[in-house]
Image (cartoon, grey):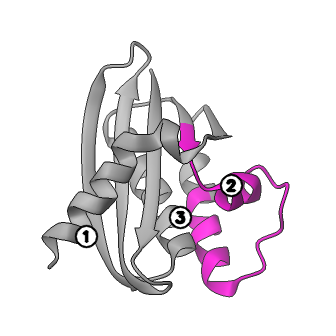
């Protein structure tokens, strides 16, 4: 079974209060899951990785064998596709977590989209941060 994940991470201030937003859909476009996770004080890049990790864990729970990961973080997308090196030590640990999670699926792909094409995941980030006030 193939699932499509839309993830976004954001911090208000960098670092600052951060959250992950995750939306998971089936191949017909039907939303299977949508949620946010508060991450405490983190950087934007940390939040982007945390969202991807959460989405892959959820896709695993839902029984996916193939996952298409759609992100608006060009950095994380290019790092996962091995186009950029992961130099930041805190991000290296997160990269390894994603890599290990991804190995549990038959196929995982990563695709970068502009923020406007990732509004649902972005809304979960903002809703989660607003609820922390």
Mark 3, other Cα within 10 Å: few <14 / some 14–19 / many ≥20: many
Q: Indicate yes or no whether the magenta region holds residue 91.
A: yes
- Residue picked out by circle 1: 129
Q: Indicate yes or no whether the magenta region holds residue 114.
A: no
Which numbered circle lies on residue 49?
A: 3
Question: Earlier along the polypeptide chain: callout 1 or callout 3?
Answer: 3
Q: Residue at x 58, y 47 (%)?
A: 102
Question: Earlier along the polypeptide chain: callout 3 or callout 2?
Answer: 3
Q: Secondary structure at mark 1?
A: helix
Where residue 12 appears, x then y in whole percent? 39, 78
Q: Which residues are magenta?
A: 69-98
The answer to whether residue 5 is above or below residue 123 is above
Q: Residue at x 26, y 37 (%)?
A: 33
Which numbered circle lies on residue 74?
A: 2
Question: Earlier along the polypeptide chain: callout 2 or callout 1?
Answer: 2
Hey, which residue is sitting farthest front in the picture?
116
Figure label count:
3
């Amino acid at each position: 079974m193939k699932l499509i994940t839309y993830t976004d991470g954001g911090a208000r201030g960098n670092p600052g209060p951060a959250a992950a937003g995750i939306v998971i859909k089936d191949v017909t476009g039907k939303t299977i899951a949508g949620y946010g996770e508060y991450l405490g004080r983190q950087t934007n890049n940390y939040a982007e990785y945390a969202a991807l990790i959460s989405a892959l864990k959820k896709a695993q729970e839902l029984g996916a064998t193939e996952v298409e990961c759609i992100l608006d973080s060009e950095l994380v997308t290019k790092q996962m596709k091995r186009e950029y090196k992961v130099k930041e030590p805190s991000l290296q640990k997160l990269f390894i977590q994603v890599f290990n999670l991804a190995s549990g699926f038959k196929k995982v792909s990563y695709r970068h989209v502009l923020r406007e094409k990732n509004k649902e995941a972005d809304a979960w980030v903002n809703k989660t941060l607003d609820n922390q006030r």
